Amino acid sequence: MNLSRPTRRTEFGLAPALAAQGLGDSRLALGLAGLGGAWGPVDQEESLTTILRALELGVKVFDAAPAYGSAEKLLGQALAQWRGPRPIISTKVGRLPGRDSHEGNYDHTPAGMRASLEHSLVVLGVAKVDLLFLHEPQMVPAAERPRVVDSLRALQADGLVQRLGIAGGCGVELDGFIESGAFDMMMLFRRVDPVILDGVGTEVPRVRRVGMTIYGASPLHMGLLGARHLQFVRERPDWVWGPQIDRAMRLQTLAEKHGMSLTTLAHRFIFGVDELDRVVIGASNRRELESALADFASGPLPQVMFDAVCDLNTVL
């Protein structure tokens, strides 16, 4: 276990490093996995209305993927109706749609990744995306990684994407990618959130050394700190690590002590982690969206509470 502690921001503010990359200055992005149906059936009309509501409320960055159910289609429909400024859009290649969120369906061939991106552009109704992530890089065999990097660079050279990023992975799973010089962005997933801070001392310094910026995804740890908390505590699925479930239970006690919901405490903690340039919130409906935005508007946790969450992560 890595015991590195994150730095607390005194205000949420903007994201100047991302703005310098042409990726907008917002510290917040809306991830569309939940709205697209990646975690289960959704009401398509409600999801579309939620995306439009996000635009109305000032959300300026959206993250989608082919593996996120109907996320790209819904975002494309929303953009066709939206008359305001065009938001920053990211999507992914490498992982394709499966029967459910647990089925991995991958294609890292040059033709497969190009076809995936071209289909995404059509569905989204845009000529290019601002940011293209390689989805789950750990699924690419080490010997194939240089070829995958070259394929992604070709998509960028052809003007189909502005910037390249990596979404997921840790440790040796990132070898051949991080130091290639091809990528501007790292999306950390289940590496820096209120129940796991390992990435602060591992992936964060590694990507900073090569000048990459950082997205923090899944701030509620796959729903463990949100709508699926009781389910995961009760069922303890093997794909949600036991230590994180135990920490989530202690975090629930901490939240109750301070008169906060678990989700609000988790959101305000991760929004205040200075090592993250942008945080990707999730939502499955308008209520969850508006609740997350209210948490963001509430500002950083007090120092004593921020420290308490960090301390919780040192307990085995």
Image (spheres, rainbow, N blue to C red):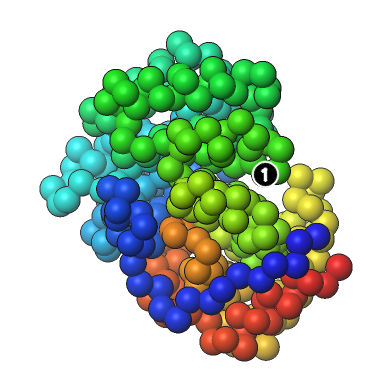
The answer to which of 287 and 97 lies nearer the viewer is: 97
Residue 129 is left or right of residue 291, and the answer is: left
* Relative height, residue 2 to residue 210 (above, below): below
The answer to which of 138 and 154 lies nearer the viewer is: 154
Q: Quadrant of residue 139?
A: top right
**At x 70% / y 67%, what residue is drawn?**
4
**At x 38% / y 20%, what residue is drawn?**
154
Residue 307 placement (x, y as % from top left): 65, 81
Counting other residues with Cα less than 10 Å from the Cα at mark 1, is it few (<14), some (14-19), or many (20 or more)?
some
Residue 38 placement (x, y as % from top left): 54, 39
Question: Residue most toward the front?
Answer: 209
Residue 252 showing in the rendered view: no
Q: Quadrant of residue 26?
A: bottom left
**At x 41% / y 78%, what residue is drawn?**
11
The answer to which of 176 and 253 lies nearer the viewer is: 176
**At x 64% / y 67%, what residue is drawn?**
194
Residue bearing the label numbered 1:
170
